[in-house]
Image (tube, helix red, strand yellow):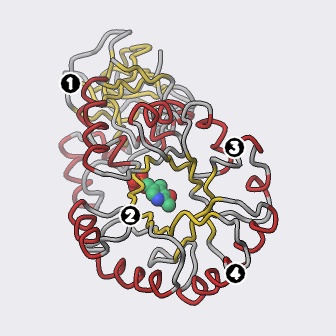
């Protein structure tokens, strides 16, 4: 019935434990759809790992994790003097670590909550949020006027690795040192183990805390399997029409209705193979189904990725299985390849 994420429990937990053991100061990132697992489950697993801090993406995500994890809650979206940032449950005020990315927000937050906990974000080549070197220096001066402020470190959000980050991180850390901030903690993302080790060696008096989501939760893909269920099977002859658009079958085979559609985040994938005219003519000559406009789906049967008979529906998808293939039964499971961070599973089953 459902689109299911199956988790091999022992194997997954062993992986999580080994990442945590290998990365002192690890900050598990629990944001968005919880990387497919749900935010609540990631919060509970973080509690089990014994870390002192987790990161959420937005203020709105706080209620999903706060009752399942009892440590500090770093919010990755920078604080602004409006919206959800001003609506934090007062009961959480002492556990929330804000991210401040503009000097005026440092002053503004501390006027509202003089003992706020926060990190100062330094702009990186990502160019998303953060203080310039000069602004970081200005923020340090502002902090001198706020004696009860609790500065918890400086945060750097680095792009996904295209070569080494070390040159950039070292330039940025030079600014951090120059700002003479009263902290020795640097929160980073997307550094390799080797980069972390090099940084720790050259900044031995700093605590480097890696914020990690993908490599933690999704780092052992072999522990994860996604399945849909065959809900219906219909034989079709060439020329039979089907689907919302009254399309006709290009040859005989079977239509398969499987669970999983747009509501789950199942989308159209790229058409198969080369779409050049010559290639199309060649596939047409071979009777290839992509030549008649069928598009590869993320569902696979007997190890082969199957074609959508038409674009996915809200809860289900229609696949076309040409004659000659083994036809699964109603109730059979089929494997699905998904982007975990963009998929809403009906169920997560830890086995
Ligand atoms: C999402 C995010 C991370 C974690 O990213 P992964 O690629 O999932 O490890 C770290 N830092 C910030 C600021 C983020 O937004």
Q: Quadrant where the C terminus lies?
A: top left
* Residue 182, visible in the rendered structure: yes
Q: Is mark 2 within 8 Å of ligand 1?
A: no
Image x and y of residue 19, in percent: 28, 44
Q: Cβ–Cβ below 8 Å for labels 3 and 1?
A: no
**Eyeballing the image, is 178 above or below 65?**
below
**Snapshot quadrant of residue 149:** bottom right
* Residue 252, visible in the rendered structure: no
The residue that mark 4 highlights is 142
Looking at the rendered structure, the secondary structure element under dot 4 is: helix
Residue 302, label in figure: 1
Looking at the rendered structure, the secondary structure element under dot 1 is: loop
Q: Does the residue labelled 1 lie within 8 Å of ligand 1?
A: no
Of badges 2 and 1, the one in the foreground is 2
Residue 348, label in figure: none
Image x and y of residue 69, in percent: 54, 35
Task: Name the one closer to the observer, 252 or 101.
Answer: 101
Image x and y of residue 34, in percent: 50, 39
The residue that mark 2 highlights is 207
Q: Residue furthest top?
A: 330
Task: Name the one closer to the observer, 48 or 220.
Answer: 48
Disc with the residue nearer the chain's start (2 vs 1): 2
Within 10 Å of the Cα at label 2, are there few (<14), some (14-19), or many (20+) other Cα atoms? Answer: some
Disc with the residue nearer the chain's start (2 vs 4): 4
Within 10 Å of the Cα at label 4, are there few (<14), some (14-19), or many (20+) other Cα atoms? Answer: some
77 horizontally vs 133: left or right: right
Q: Which residue is drawn at 56% across and 58% down?
A: 76
Q: Cβ–Cβ below 8 Å for labels 2 and 4?
A: no
Q: Does the residue labelled 4 lie within 8 Å of ligand 1?
A: no
**Eyeballing the image, is 340 above or below 257?**
below
The residue that mark 3 highlights is 92
């Amino acid at each position: 019935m459902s689109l299911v994420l199956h988790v091999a429990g022992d194997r997954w937990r062993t992986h999580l434990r080994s990442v945590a053991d290998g990365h002192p100061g690890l900050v598990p990132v629990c944001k968005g759809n919880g990387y497919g697992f749900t935010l609540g489950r990631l919060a509970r697993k973080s509690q089990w790992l014994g870390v002192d801090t987790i990161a959420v993406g937005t203020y709105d995500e706080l209620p999903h994790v706060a009752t399942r994890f009892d440590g500090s809650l770093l919010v990755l979206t920078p604080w602004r003097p409006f919206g959800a940032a001003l609506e934090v449950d007062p009961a959480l005020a002492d556990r929330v670590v804000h991210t401040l990315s503009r000097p005026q927000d440092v002053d503004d937050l501390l006027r509202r909550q003089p003992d706020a906990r926060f990190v100062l974000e330094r702009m990186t080549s990502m160019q998303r949020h953060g203080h310039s070197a000069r602004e970081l220096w200005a923020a340090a001066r502002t902090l001198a006027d706020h004696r009860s402020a609790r500065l918890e470190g400086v945060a750097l959000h680095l792009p996904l690795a295209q070569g080494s980050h070390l040159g950039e991180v070292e330039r940025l850390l030079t600014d951090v040192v120059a700002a003479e901030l009263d902290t020795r903690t640097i929160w980073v993302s997307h550094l390799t183990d080797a980069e972390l080790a090099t940084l720790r060696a050259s900044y031995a008096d700093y605590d480097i805390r890696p914020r990690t989501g993908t490599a933690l939760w999704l780092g052992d893909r072999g522990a994860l399997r996604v399945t849909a269920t065959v809900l219906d099977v219909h034989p079709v002859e060439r020329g039979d029409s089907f689907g919302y658009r009254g399309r006709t079958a290009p040859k005989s085979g079977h239509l398969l209705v499987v669970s999983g559609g747009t509501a789950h985040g199942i989308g159209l994938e790229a058409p198969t193979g080369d779409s050049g005219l010559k290639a199309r003519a060649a596939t047409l000559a071979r009777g290839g189904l992509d030549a008649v406009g069928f598009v590869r789906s993320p569902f696979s049967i007997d190890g082969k990725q199957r074609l959508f008979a038409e674009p996915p529906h809200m809860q289900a998808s229609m696949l076309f299985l040409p004659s000659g293939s083994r036809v699964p039964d109603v109730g059979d499971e089929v494997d699905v390849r998904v982007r975990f961070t963009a998929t809403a599973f009906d169920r997560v089953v830890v086995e």
